[in-house]
Image (cartoon, rainbow, N blue to C red):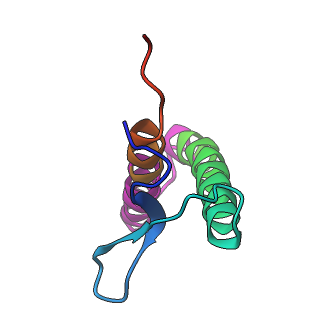
Amino acid sequence: MTMPSEPRLLPWTGPDGKPCHLITDDSDGYLSRLADYVESTQLGAATELLDRALATLDDTNTDSNDLRLLAKDLAGALRDTLRVAISRGHRLTPFE
């Protein structure tokens, strides 16, 4: 569990690919709201990509280049979704 004053894993990485964290007691601050918005956008994009993937995989005429691009897009969406899940999991309050 992450307390409000502990670092929050942000839904993006730095220029060197390393994770970014936010330390704040204000869960309604600008960066917190921006992170919430980016997480929501990433999850929405993953949902749309899943629909596209299912349609693409059902199409027997899909060529290998399209499948490779789909796999790359799915891997990126999975990476983003896992980062959101980890970040949100750290912010859960324990059951007592």
Height in image: 23 above or below 52?
below
Rendering coords of residue 67 (x, y %)? 41, 58
Residue 7's quadrant in the figure?
Answer: bottom left
- Residue found 39% across the figure and 41% down from its top: 90
Q: Is residue 40 rendered magenta in the image?
A: no
Rendering coords of residue 60 (x, y %)? 50, 44
- Residue found 46% across the figure and 49% down from its top: 81
Asked if residue 82 shows in the view, the reply is yes
- Residue found 42% across the figure and 22% down from its top: 94
Task: Classify the position of the C terminus by image quarter.
Answer: top left
Q: Residue furthest bottom?
A: 15
Asked if residue 66 shows in the view, the reply is no
Height in image: 84 above or below 91?
below
Rendering coords of residue 77 (x, y %)? 47, 56
Rendering coords of residue 82 (x, y %)? 39, 47
- Looking at the rendering, the stretch of residues picked out in magenta corresponds to 56-82
Task: Classify the position of the N terminus by image quarter.
Answer: top left
Q: Quick check: 24 left or right of 85?
A: right
